Amino acid sequence: MSFYRRYSLFIGIFLLACIIILLLSKPSTMFSGEAYFIDDEPFRASPDGVYVKTKMNLGDSEHMKNFPLVIGEWEGFEYDSSYWEDYLEADAVLLRAYQKGDLYQPVFLQIVQGQSGSSVHQPADCYVAQGYTIEEQGNETLLITDVSWAEDGSPVSIPIKKMVVYKESENQVTERRIVIYWYVEGNRIASNTVTIIEVSAHAPLEGSYERILSETKDFAAKAIPYVFAPSKSETVMAQLIHWGALGYFILISLICIPLVLALFPRFRARQNQNPDQTEPQK
Protein backbone atom coordinates (compact mmCIF):
# COMPACT_ATOMS: atom_id res chain seq x y z
CA MET A 1 0.00 0.00 0.00
CA SER A 2 1.40 3.39 -0.99
CA PHE A 3 2.11 6.12 1.54
CA TYR A 4 -0.61 8.31 0.05
CA ARG A 5 -3.26 5.60 0.17
CA ARG A 6 -2.35 4.73 3.76
CA TYR A 7 -2.42 8.30 5.07
CA SER A 8 -4.82 9.97 2.62
CA LEU A 9 -7.53 10.51 5.26
CA PHE A 10 -5.08 12.21 7.63
CA ILE A 11 -3.60 14.32 4.83
CA GLY A 12 -7.03 15.41 3.64
CA ILE A 13 -8.26 16.35 7.14
CA PHE A 14 -5.04 18.24 7.86
CA LEU A 15 -5.32 20.23 4.61
CA LEU A 16 -9.02 20.93 5.28
CA ALA A 17 -8.18 22.27 8.77
CA CYS A 18 -5.45 24.51 7.29
CA ILE A 19 -7.85 25.83 4.65
CA ILE A 20 -10.57 26.56 7.24
CA ILE A 21 -8.05 28.46 9.40
CA LEU A 22 -6.97 30.43 6.32
CA LEU A 23 -10.55 31.24 5.32
CA LEU A 24 -11.44 32.47 8.82
CA SER A 25 -8.29 34.57 9.14
CA LYS A 26 -7.80 38.21 8.24
CA PRO A 27 -4.98 38.94 5.79
CA SER A 28 -3.99 42.09 7.69
CA THR A 29 -3.55 40.15 10.92
CA MET A 30 -1.76 37.23 9.28
CA PHE A 31 1.07 39.14 7.68
CA SER A 32 1.36 42.48 9.49
CA GLY A 33 2.45 43.75 12.88
CA GLU A 34 -1.08 43.89 14.19
CA ALA A 35 -2.04 42.40 17.52
CA TYR A 36 -5.11 41.16 19.29
CA PHE A 37 -6.42 41.36 22.82
CA ILE A 38 -6.75 38.19 24.79
CA ASP A 39 -8.47 37.93 28.15
CA ASP A 40 -6.74 34.85 29.46
CA GLU A 41 -3.13 33.66 29.44
CA PRO A 42 -0.36 34.96 27.17
CA PHE A 43 0.55 32.94 24.07
CA ARG A 44 -3.00 31.71 23.72
CA ALA A 45 -5.66 33.50 21.69
CA SER A 46 -9.11 33.98 23.19
CA PRO A 47 -12.15 33.46 20.94
CA ASP A 48 -13.38 36.84 22.23
CA GLY A 49 -10.15 38.64 21.32
CA VAL A 50 -10.43 41.93 19.45
CA TYR A 51 -8.07 42.53 16.55
CA VAL A 52 -6.34 45.91 16.58
CA LYS A 53 -3.64 47.99 14.96
CA THR A 54 -1.03 49.52 17.22
CA LYS A 55 -0.55 53.29 17.16
CA MET A 56 2.64 53.16 19.19
CA ASN A 57 5.81 51.08 19.15
CA LEU A 58 5.25 49.20 22.40
CA GLY A 59 8.76 47.79 22.27
CA ASP A 60 10.54 51.16 22.35
CA SER A 61 10.74 52.91 25.74
CA GLU A 62 11.53 56.29 24.21
CA HIS A 63 8.59 56.07 21.87
CA MET A 64 6.36 54.94 24.73
CA LYS A 65 7.11 58.19 26.55
CA ASN A 66 4.98 59.93 23.92
CA PHE A 67 1.93 58.30 25.47
CA PRO A 68 -0.17 61.31 26.54
CA LEU A 69 -0.03 62.63 30.08
CA VAL A 70 -3.54 64.05 29.67
CA ILE A 71 -6.37 61.66 28.80
CA GLY A 72 -9.70 63.39 28.98
CA GLU A 73 -10.08 64.65 32.55
CA TRP A 74 -7.20 62.44 33.72
CA GLU A 75 -3.77 64.03 34.27
CA GLY A 76 -0.70 61.88 34.76
CA PHE A 77 2.91 61.83 35.86
CA GLU A 78 5.61 59.32 35.00
CA TYR A 79 7.76 57.01 37.10
CA ASP A 80 11.29 55.98 36.19
CA SER A 81 10.99 52.50 34.66
CA SER A 82 14.67 51.74 33.94
CA TYR A 83 15.00 49.45 36.98
CA TRP A 84 12.00 47.35 35.94
CA GLU A 85 13.20 47.07 32.35
CA ASP A 86 16.44 45.51 33.60
CA TYR A 87 14.79 43.41 36.31
CA LEU A 88 12.11 41.99 33.99
CA GLU A 89 14.42 41.80 30.96
CA ALA A 90 11.67 43.62 29.09
CA ASP A 91 11.85 45.38 25.74
CA ALA A 92 10.01 48.39 27.17
CA VAL A 93 8.19 49.43 30.35
CA LEU A 94 5.89 52.38 30.92
CA LEU A 95 4.83 53.32 34.47
CA ARG A 96 2.36 56.16 34.99
CA ALA A 97 -0.08 57.44 37.60
CA TYR A 98 -3.20 59.38 36.57
CA GLN A 99 -5.58 61.41 38.68
CA LYS A 100 -8.68 63.51 38.12
CA GLY A 101 -10.27 66.24 40.21
CA ASP A 102 -13.25 64.37 41.66
CA LEU A 103 -11.24 61.28 42.66
CA TYR A 104 -9.20 61.39 45.84
CA GLN A 105 -6.52 58.96 44.61
CA PRO A 106 -4.68 58.07 41.38
CA VAL A 107 -4.95 55.03 39.16
CA PHE A 108 -1.73 53.37 38.07
CA LEU A 109 -0.95 52.34 34.51
CA GLN A 110 1.69 49.75 33.67
CA ILE A 111 2.63 48.60 30.16
CA VAL A 112 5.30 45.92 29.78
CA GLN A 113 6.39 44.33 26.52
CA GLY A 114 8.75 41.40 26.35
CA GLN A 115 9.53 38.01 24.90
CA SER A 116 10.82 36.05 27.88
CA GLY A 117 8.78 34.37 30.58
CA SER A 118 10.20 36.73 33.19
CA SER A 119 8.96 39.90 31.55
CA VAL A 120 5.56 38.53 30.53
CA HIS A 121 4.49 37.79 34.07
CA GLN A 122 1.24 36.65 35.60
CA PRO A 123 -0.19 39.46 37.77
CA ALA A 124 -1.46 36.95 40.33
CA ASP A 125 2.02 35.50 40.82
CA CYS A 126 3.54 38.98 40.90
CA TYR A 127 1.22 40.28 43.64
CA VAL A 128 1.56 37.14 45.74
CA ALA A 129 5.36 37.50 45.53
CA GLN A 130 4.96 41.06 46.87
CA GLY A 131 3.07 39.83 49.93
CA TYR A 132 -0.51 40.30 48.75
CA THR A 133 -3.31 37.80 49.24
CA ILE A 134 -5.75 37.27 46.39
CA GLU A 135 -9.29 38.00 47.52
CA GLU A 136 -11.05 37.65 44.20
CA GLN A 137 -10.36 36.90 40.53
CA GLY A 138 -12.69 36.98 37.56
CA ASN A 139 -13.58 38.28 34.11
CA GLU A 140 -14.65 41.80 33.28
CA THR A 141 -15.51 43.76 30.15
CA LEU A 142 -14.42 47.18 28.94
CA LEU A 143 -16.79 49.11 26.69
CA ILE A 144 -14.92 51.35 24.26
CA THR A 145 -17.20 54.22 23.23
CA ASP A 146 -14.62 56.31 21.36
CA VAL A 147 -16.02 57.35 17.96
CA SER A 148 -13.11 55.71 16.14
CA TRP A 149 -14.01 52.40 17.77
CA ALA A 150 -17.80 52.44 17.88
CA GLU A 151 -19.39 50.21 15.26
CA ASP A 152 -22.62 51.78 14.03
CA GLY A 153 -22.72 53.78 17.25
CA SER A 154 -22.41 50.68 19.44
CA PRO A 155 -19.54 50.33 21.96
CA VAL A 156 -16.89 47.69 21.32
CA SER A 157 -16.53 45.11 24.08
CA ILE A 158 -12.99 44.24 25.23
CA PRO A 159 -12.56 41.15 27.48
CA ILE A 160 -10.20 41.69 30.42
CA LYS A 161 -9.29 40.13 33.76
CA LYS A 162 -10.05 41.58 37.21
CA MET A 163 -8.33 40.84 40.49
CA VAL A 164 -8.77 42.09 44.06
CA VAL A 165 -5.76 41.72 46.39
CA TYR A 166 -4.97 42.85 49.92
CA LYS A 167 -2.17 42.98 52.50
CA GLU A 168 -2.45 42.30 56.21
CA SER A 169 -0.46 43.28 59.27
CA GLU A 170 -1.26 41.76 62.67
CA ASN A 171 -4.49 40.32 61.24
CA GLN A 172 -5.62 43.76 60.05
CA VAL A 173 -6.05 44.65 56.36
CA THR A 174 -3.65 47.50 55.65
CA GLU A 175 -4.01 47.73 51.87
CA ARG A 176 -6.55 46.61 49.29
CA ARG A 177 -6.14 47.01 45.56
CA ILE A 178 -8.23 46.59 42.40
CA VAL A 179 -6.31 45.31 39.37
CA ILE A 180 -7.55 44.95 35.79
CA TYR A 181 -5.30 43.67 33.05
CA TRP A 182 -5.14 42.15 29.60
CA TYR A 183 -2.51 40.78 27.27
CA VAL A 184 -1.78 42.00 23.76
CA GLU A 185 -0.06 39.41 21.61
CA GLY A 186 1.86 40.32 18.49
CA ASN A 187 1.11 38.39 15.33
CA ARG A 188 2.98 35.08 15.62
CA ILE A 189 4.10 35.24 12.00
CA ALA A 190 5.42 38.80 12.28
CA SER A 191 6.39 38.94 15.95
CA ASN A 192 6.89 36.81 19.05
CA THR A 193 6.33 39.59 21.59
CA VAL A 194 3.60 39.83 24.21
CA THR A 195 2.51 42.99 26.02
CA ILE A 196 0.68 43.14 29.33
CA ILE A 197 -1.31 46.26 30.16
CA GLU A 198 -2.40 46.68 33.76
CA VAL A 199 -4.43 49.39 35.48
CA SER A 200 -4.77 49.34 39.26
CA ALA A 201 -5.97 51.51 42.13
CA HIS A 202 -6.31 51.38 45.91
CA ALA A 203 -9.72 50.22 47.11
CA PRO A 204 -11.50 50.70 50.46
CA LEU A 205 -10.09 48.37 53.09
CA GLU A 206 -13.48 46.71 53.46
CA GLY A 207 -16.88 46.74 51.82
CA SER A 208 -17.77 47.59 48.26
CA TYR A 209 -15.11 48.50 45.71
CA GLU A 210 -17.54 49.17 42.85
CA ARG A 211 -16.85 52.89 42.55
CA ILE A 212 -13.08 52.55 42.25
CA LEU A 213 -13.52 49.61 39.86
CA SER A 214 -15.77 51.80 37.71
CA GLU A 215 -13.21 54.63 37.75
CA THR A 216 -10.39 52.22 36.87
CA LYS A 217 -12.35 50.80 33.94
CA ASP A 218 -13.31 54.31 32.83
CA PHE A 219 -9.65 55.32 32.64
CA ALA A 220 -8.66 52.11 30.82
CA ALA A 221 -11.45 52.54 28.27
CA LYS A 222 -10.33 56.11 27.56
CA ALA A 223 -6.65 55.13 27.32
CA ILE A 224 -7.01 52.24 24.88
CA PRO A 225 -7.80 54.38 21.78
CA TYR A 226 -4.52 56.27 22.31
CA VAL A 227 -2.59 53.02 21.88
CA PHE A 228 -4.70 50.97 19.47
CA ALA A 229 -7.10 51.35 16.58
CA PRO A 230 -9.58 48.63 15.62
CA SER A 231 -8.78 46.45 12.64
CA LYS A 232 -11.87 46.32 10.46
CA SER A 233 -10.47 44.08 7.72
CA GLU A 234 -12.62 41.15 6.63
CA THR A 235 -11.80 37.48 6.74
CA VAL A 236 -10.59 35.73 3.59
CA MET A 237 -13.94 33.93 3.37
CA ALA A 238 -15.91 37.19 3.51
CA GLN A 239 -13.73 38.72 0.81
CA LEU A 240 -14.24 35.70 -1.46
CA ILE A 241 -18.01 35.87 -0.96
CA HIS A 242 -17.96 39.52 -2.06
CA TRP A 243 -16.40 38.41 -5.34
CA GLY A 244 -19.65 36.77 -6.36
CA ALA A 245 -19.75 33.61 -8.50
CA LEU A 246 -15.96 33.43 -8.88
CA GLY A 247 -15.49 33.74 -5.14
CA TYR A 248 -18.01 30.98 -4.44
CA PHE A 249 -16.29 28.74 -7.00
CA ILE A 250 -12.90 29.27 -5.32
CA LEU A 251 -14.43 28.73 -1.88
CA ILE A 252 -16.14 25.46 -2.87
CA SER A 253 -13.00 24.26 -4.66
CA LEU A 254 -10.80 24.93 -1.65
CA ILE A 255 -13.10 22.88 0.56
CA CYS A 256 -13.65 20.04 -1.94
CA ILE A 257 -10.00 19.45 -2.84
CA PRO A 258 -8.92 18.06 0.58
CA LEU A 259 -12.15 16.03 0.80
CA VAL A 260 -11.37 14.43 -2.55
CA LEU A 261 -7.78 13.77 -1.48
CA ALA A 262 -9.03 12.09 1.69
CA LEU A 263 -11.84 9.98 0.23
CA PHE A 264 -10.86 9.12 -3.35
CA PRO A 265 -8.29 6.38 -2.52
CA ARG A 266 -10.88 4.64 -0.33
CA PHE A 267 -13.47 4.90 -3.08
CA ARG A 268 -11.04 3.36 -5.60
CA ALA A 269 -10.09 0.61 -3.18
CA ARG A 270 -13.73 -0.27 -2.63
CA GLN A 271 -14.36 -0.31 -6.38
CA ASN A 272 -11.39 -2.61 -6.92
CA GLN A 273 -12.67 -5.00 -4.28
CA ASN A 274 -16.07 -5.22 -6.04
CA PRO A 275 -15.27 -5.22 -9.78
CA ASP A 276 -18.52 -7.02 -10.67
CA GLN A 277 -20.55 -4.02 -9.45
CA THR A 278 -18.97 -1.83 -12.09
CA GLU A 279 -19.62 -4.18 -15.05
CA PRO A 280 -22.98 -4.13 -16.91
CA GLN A 281 -25.08 -7.22 -16.42
CA LYS A 282 -25.51 -9.53 -19.44
Image (cartoon, grey):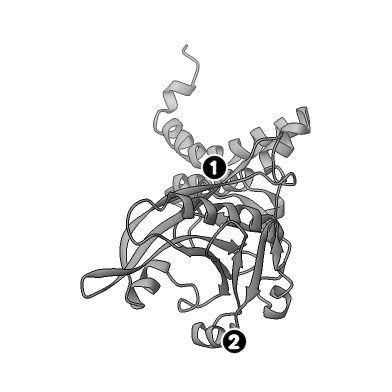
The residue identified by callout 2 is: 82
Return the residue nearer the eye: 78 or 65: 78
Image quarter of residue 252? top right
For image coordinates 56% across by 84% down, the residue present is 85
Secondary structure state at the residue bearing disc 1? helix
Q: Residues within 10 Å of mark 1 (few under 14, many from 20)?
A: many
Return the residue nearer the eye: 180 or 122: 180
Which residue reaches farthest top?
A: 282
Where in the figure is residue 52, as x and y percent of width and height?
A: 66, 54
Q: Is residue 277 above or below residue 246?
A: above
| Lower sequence index among marks 2 and 1 | 2
For image coordinates 53% across by 56% down, the residue present is 216
For image coordinates 54% across by 54% down, the residue present is 215
Is 27 left or right of 2, judged from the image as shown? right
Label number found at residue 180: none
Image quarter of residue 256? top right
Where in the figure is residue 253, as x and y percent of width and height?
A: 66, 36
Where in the figure is residue 257, as x and y percent of width and height?
A: 60, 40
> Does any portion of residue 200 appear in the rendered image?
yes
Where in the figure is residue 49, as x and y percent of width and height?
A: 55, 50
Distance CA(mark 2)–CA(mark 1): 57 Å
For image coordinates 70% across by 68% down, the residue present is 69
Secondary structure state at the residue bearing disc 2? helix
Is 91 left or right of 33, judged from the image as shown? left
Q: Is residue 12 above or below residue 123?
A: above
Is 231 left or right of 204, judged from the image as shown? right
> Does any portion of residue 190 appear in the rendered image?
no
The residue identified by callout 1 is: 261
Question: Which amino acid, mark 2?
Answer: Ser
Is 216 left or right of 71, judged from the image as shown? left
